[in-house]
Image (cartoon, grey):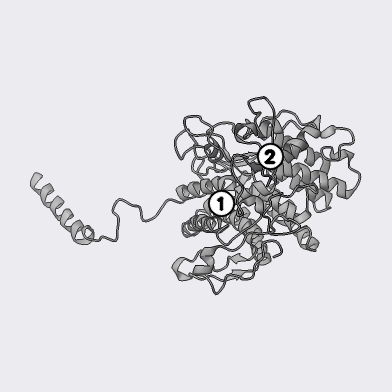
Amino acid sequence: MKKLSIILFGALVLSSCSKNFFDINQNPNSSTNASVDLVLANAQTVTASRLIVAGNFQTITEWMNYWAPSGSYALSASDGASYKETTDFGDGNWQASYRNLEDYDYVEKTATATNNYFYIGAAKAMKAFVFQQLVDQFNNIPYSQALQGTANLTPKYDDAQSVYDDLAKQLKAAIVYFKRADAIGSTTEDVLFSGNNTKWIQFCNSLRLRMLIRQSQIGRNAYIQTEINDIVGNGGGFLSTDASVNPGYTNSSGKQNPFYGFCINTAGTFTQDFWRANRYIINFCQANNDPRYTFWYAPNSSGNYVGNILGANNNAVGSVASVFGPGLLQSVSQSAIVFTAAESYFLQAEAVLRGYLPGNAQSLFNSGVQSSFNYLGAGSSSAYTSQPGNLQTNYGACGTFAQQLGCIIRQKYLAFNTTTPVEAWSDYRRLAMPADMPLSIHNQIDRQPPAIPTRLLYATSEYVTNPTNVPTGIDYHTS
């Protein structure tokens, strides 16, 4: 038996060597096919981590007057407060988004080949989420010919409206998969909803509603109404809790909650020296009895809340200006927001106000505000939303459509503070609200009068690798 074992082992070794040992193009220690649940988990983590700490999103947070630079830094001509852009400005975001989409596309194609219905639905939903952000930032994008690898290195650009319309179809298709009894996902590797199909359906419906409300100003009422009727008809409802990612954040380098790690190192030292509170938010909150500023920001060493002005040359320096507070920096292991319950409620409130959706707009509005308070740990919002005659906080005090819409968008804007700022930017471009949004006073703004950019420029990498198709002549204030 010993001799036979030696002979068989030798034959196996020789066979293995002859086929694989000298194949330097294969790594014997690397899997050739990644598991869809692991790829999904990683892709979800990447999506969530970029929503605040990615460079473009930091600048958009600055444009929306949530943050302002510390006075310890001299303003440059290319600072975000100058509202200037180059084609390098959005390059990192562009490339990272398409890399993220490649992972979701891998999950969808691999799951389709094995009839793994949960992962087909999850991949479709997350692809729609990332593509929607790309459209909102860049307008026309590669879509129908994208994600083909070397089969098509120069994909055409699709019209933004057609992309939006197809994303709605993809989300509807995802819901069909999630409703299957055999659509079963991992409770541990789905780091967004832990394999909860009901939550996934609510996410799809909420994302569809976001995209429909985004089109409220362009004469598509009939389309919007038909789509919302379809959402109501599927019976899945909308998000009532925050959609957030947590792969197991811990106090190790590279494994902290992304925003927490952006501000505080593993030794517990606050290291975020550039960004400070914006004065606009603090002034509004103090004038309207809004306690949330004490959760968004922290008092300075004198116990005061001090915000800086976007573009000012004499802003408070160092620790004089307020840094981020306990509502945003809850713990190293806090979940990373993807889609807030507050946004879901405010979208529903606006849909009811516009007559698209049945329901009580004031009740939905109040739930949106309370959800924002809940996220920050700020307690009850009932006194805040019932201030007599306050058109900024009390929906019931508003008597006209314009006042009611203004109240919804004001509170929606506040709820987006350092969670999903790009959505506040989209609302501002759609409605020019909040109407009193201050503009940067940077002394090197290239537009007079100053104006917040309406879009990002196409990436430098596209002009290098896809020059035939990438649109030219783009103006980031007027295009």
Q: Residue at x 56, y 40 (%)?
A: 259
Q: Amino acid at mark 2?
A: Asn
Which numbered marker is on residue 308?
Answer: 2
Using the image as rendered, state which of residue 44 and residue 305 is in the foreground.
305
Give the side of residue 190 with respect to residue 389, left or right. left
When asked about the image quadrant of residue 456, the answer is: bottom right
Q: Quadrant of the N terminus?
A: top left
Is label 1 in contact with label 2 (beta carbons under 8 Å)? no
Using the image as rendered, state which of residue 442 and residue 218 is in the foreground.
442
Q: Residue at x 89, y 39 (%)?
A: 397
Which numbered marker is on residue 459?
Answer: none
Give the number of marks: 2
Using the image as rendered, state which of residue 427 and residue 228 is in the foreground.
427
Residue 198 in the image: x percent, y percent? 63, 44
Label 2: few (<14), some or many (≥20) within 10 Å?
many
Give the side of residue 407 with respect to residue 453, left or right. right
Label 1: few (<14), some or many (≥20) within 10 Å?
many
Residue denoted by label 1: 122
Determine whether the residue tagged by mark 2 lies in a helix, strand or loop: loop
Q: Amino acid at mark 1?
A: Ala
Determine whether the residue tagged by mark 1 lies in a helix, strand or loop: helix
Residue 290 in the image: x percent, y percent? 76, 33
Residue 389 in the image: x percent, y percent? 90, 36
